[in-house]
Amino acid sequence: MITEEQFKSIASKFPEVSETPKFEIKSFAVKKKIFATLNIKENRATIKLTESDQYAFSAFDKSMIYPVPNKWGKNGWTHLNLTKISVEILQDALTAAYCNVAPTKLASIVLPKSEGFE
């Protein structure tokens, strides 16, 4: 199970992330764009993915990672079950969500170009 401290530690490691509490939900944003929310009461996080990333991450286990069941889900918002997800998958999913909303310059810090690729 992912704890609140683990989630916050991973989400806050990206450049220029701000955390904003709102009741029992906390949001994590870059340049005022939210890429993740944390709802400890429900043991769930919600992240903003591209459609292809959402499909790929949901393929692991639909009880662990799944689209929000409404129009938000069709726009890439994806739930993470914190009682089932591993730290490694959480890190990968948060990285994808961050890079999805961050300006290109900040995203390139997190995912630098590989050698030989442009």
Image (spheres, rainbow, N blue to C red):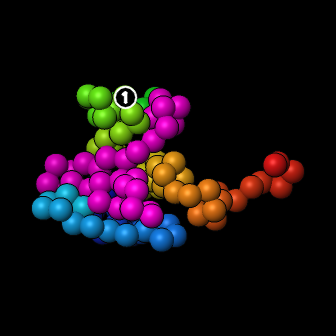
Q: Name the residue located 63 percent from the left edge and 62 percent from the top edge.
A: 105
The secondary element bearing badge 1 is classed as: helix
Image quadrant holding the N terminus, namely bottom left
Residue 71: x and y in percent read 29, 29
**Magenta residues?**
27-56
Residue 20: x and y in percent read 27, 67
Where is residue 73, by image quadrant? top left
Vertical order, 81 against 115 (above or below)? above
Residue 34: x and y in percent read 37, 55
Where is residue 110, by image quadrant? bottom right
Counting other residues with Cα less than 10 Å from the Cα at mark 1, is it few (<14), some (14-19), or many (20 or more)?
some
> Is 50 part of what is drawn in magenta?
yes
> Is 31 part of what is drawn in magenta?
yes
Q: Name the residue located 21 percent from the left edge and 66 percent from the top edge.
A: 21
* Left or right of 34 in this view: 83: left
Q: Name the residue located 25 percent from the left edge and 48 percent from the top edge.
A: 44
Given the image, on which type of amino acid does mark 1 rest?
A: Lys
Could you tell me if residue 98 is visible in this image? yes
Q: Which residue is mark 1?
A: 74
Of all residues shown, which one is farthest toward the front?
32
Of all residues shown, which one is farthest toward the right?
116
Residue 3: x and y in percent read 28, 62
Vertical order, 52 against 21 (above or below)? above
Q: Name the residue located 45 percent from the left edge and 64 percent from the top edge.
A: 31
Q: How many numbered marks appear?
A: 1
Q: Which is nearer the eye, 58 or 73?
A: 73
Could you tell me if residue 92 is visible in this image? no
